[in-house]
Amino acid sequence: MKRNSLWSWIVLVLAVLYFALPLIGTFEFSLKMRRGVYSLDAYRVVLSDPRFQSTFLYSVTMALCTIVLGIVIVVPTAYWVRLKLPRWRPIIEFITLLPLVIPPIVVVFGYIRLYNTSSWLPLTGSAWGTNVLLAFGYATLALPYMYRAVDTGLRAIDVATLTEAAQSLGASWFTIMGRVILPNVSVAVMSGAFLTFAIVIGEFVMAALLSRPAFGPYMQLLGANRAYEPAALAVIAFAITWLCMGLIQLVSRFSKASPARI
Amino acid sequence: MAFLEIRNIQKSFGAAQVVRDFNLDVESGEFVSFLGPSGCGKTTVLRIVAGFEEPSSGSITIGGHEVTRLKPNQRDIGMVFQAYALFPNMTVAQNIAFGLKVARASQAEIGERVRAMLALIKLPELGDRYPYQLSGGQQQRVALARALAPRPKLLLLDEPLSALDAKVRVALRQEIRAIQKELGITTIFVTHDQEEALSISDRIVVMYGGKAEQVGTPFEVYNRPATRFVANFVGTLNVLEGTVTDAAGGIVEVQAEKVALKGKLNGARTGDRLSLALRPEAIALGRRPGYDSSLKGRIAEVHFLGSVIRVRVELGETVVSLDTFNSPSSPPPAVGDTAEISFSSADVSILQ
């Protein structure tokens, strides 16, 4: 038993070193911009760069749009599959997993071929249209995470009986969705939303190939031309991701005390 | 014209027919129970009335309006579910107010109605609690208040007491009946518990194999079961096999003894085999004044149950159960003793 415990600790320490060392190294390097002393100069430079602000704002806006799009597509779909089409669940789950199998570069080339300026729906012909295309692309990328989060939330409530109870009280489908189902899976939706946010903030391929001023391409551009700033930017990106993960944990913990989960 | 008319309802799921030619009239203010074992179709009929299932054929009329093809939210019904189905994200008061908000009632009316409903279910101080903060019995009372708040025409109760413990069940079923009587609302109650159905219903529909086996008052269903299934399902029943020896005189031979059943033979002819049904409480050990029939047998088992002693008597290949009251001055019979049982032919039912 003690032997097992020792091995567990050894494996844990090795794993922590494997994951943490590069991060610690990057962080340490990001503090070395001023020769001889540790400083936050690299962070100051990055944060005061107008391109950082504009690309970050763009990506945050796109992330919020993607979250709304994801909720509008996923919540009714997952609800309907649970309520009326339970036999379709494996098929829907398979479809939602496809974005993990098909590389984003394939998806975005497909988009460009389908929606270019000479197509029947020339979305890439305008900045607004390309933004819409990018939001749909991001929603596709986030689909596996959003669907699973919402489906898990729906599993925790008796969807069929709650729906019938609301129907017997005169509620329409819209009311049932807005007042009964969505509030009861809000914690799950928020988990999916934070994951979507983390994915969109760091996404590079789609934004770069659709030529949109997003945070991912900015990080790549900075990485190719500067020494210390990319390290600072990487740490900032990690911090944002971790913040999202922390918020998911916080929301999940809040959910244990929430009436909706009991 | 009855308030609720269920006409020729048939329902199939794939190849399985779960409801067969179901007909029922329910008068306004009546409390009718659907009683039957699992899979007998009772819940399916209730769900068809509610609009959650569409019948394969037949029609439903509520208050003179045909509702067969209407959606559940257009039928003006209130429903209480076995699993409570309170909205977890809402407080008790918000749950009760839900139907009224959907109907766009004014805030003043909603507030007043919620207070009245909370008073009706005797939980006036629990309006701010969430469902998870309530016991099962309290949750079901809230579910009842929520169903009643929008003043539905018809109240449907789908095994509302099944998830509760025994004491709460008894208390709550009496409470449900009292509230139903107070409001005078037409109610259909689905249960598989015969005691529940017998104790609170105006009429009982005993269902089996998707059909109504018998519709009658609790007294009729218990004392005059129409079919062998009803007789076996509702209460304990002794079935004695007999042969008609004199159809004109109503004489049936059971275990070589003659039993006079004039007027009860339902057209049976001499030589026909019949099944005679008797409740344990209708049989006496020994000869009792006023009981016109008797049979001889042997005591096979004696179960002391406190105030009641259940005795099982062997009559040839048949064993009958009878109940006698405990008396401290007379000890219970001994197993193996010969015994005579007596009964009144008036208490005998002929099973179809």
Image (cartoon, coloured by chain):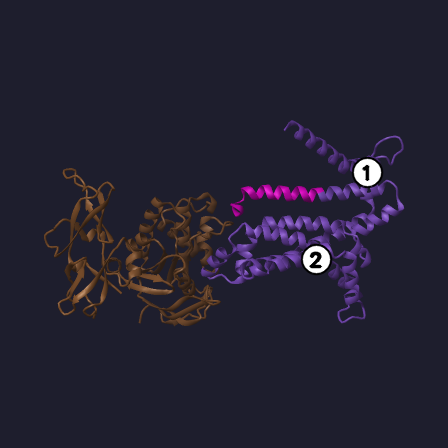
Chain colours: A purple, B brown
Q: Position of residue A240 (x, y in %)?
A: 73, 44
Q: Earlier in the sequence, mark 2 or mark 1?
A: 1
What residue type is disc 2 on?
Answer: Leu
The number of numbered discs placed on residues in the rendered structure image is: 2
Q: Quadrant of residue B227?
A: bottom left
Check if residue B221 falls in the magenta segment: no
Q: Quadrant of residue A9?
A: top right
Looking at the image, residue B115 lies above or below residue B258: above
Check if residue A260 falls in the magenta segment: yes
Residue receiving disc 2? A98
Residue receiving disc 1? A26
Res. B220 mark: none
On whether disc 2 and disc 1 are found on a single subunit, the reply is yes
What residue type is disc 1 on?
Answer: Thr
| For residue A190, side relative to residue B25 (left or right) | right
Label 2 sits on a secondary structure element that is: helix
Instruction: Assess disc 2: are there few (<14), some (14-19) or many (≥20) residues with their C-alpha within 10 Å of its C-alpha.
Output: some
Magenta segment main secondary structure: helix
Instruction: Assess disc 1: are there few (<14), some (14-19) or many (≥20) residues with their C-alpha within 10 Å of its C-alpha.
Output: some
Q: Position of residue A82 (x, y in %)?
A: 56, 57
| For residue B309, side relative to residue B21 (left or right) | left
| For residue B60, side relative to residue A115 (left or right) | left
Towards the viewer: B136 or B329? B329
Residue farthest to the left, as pictured:
B289
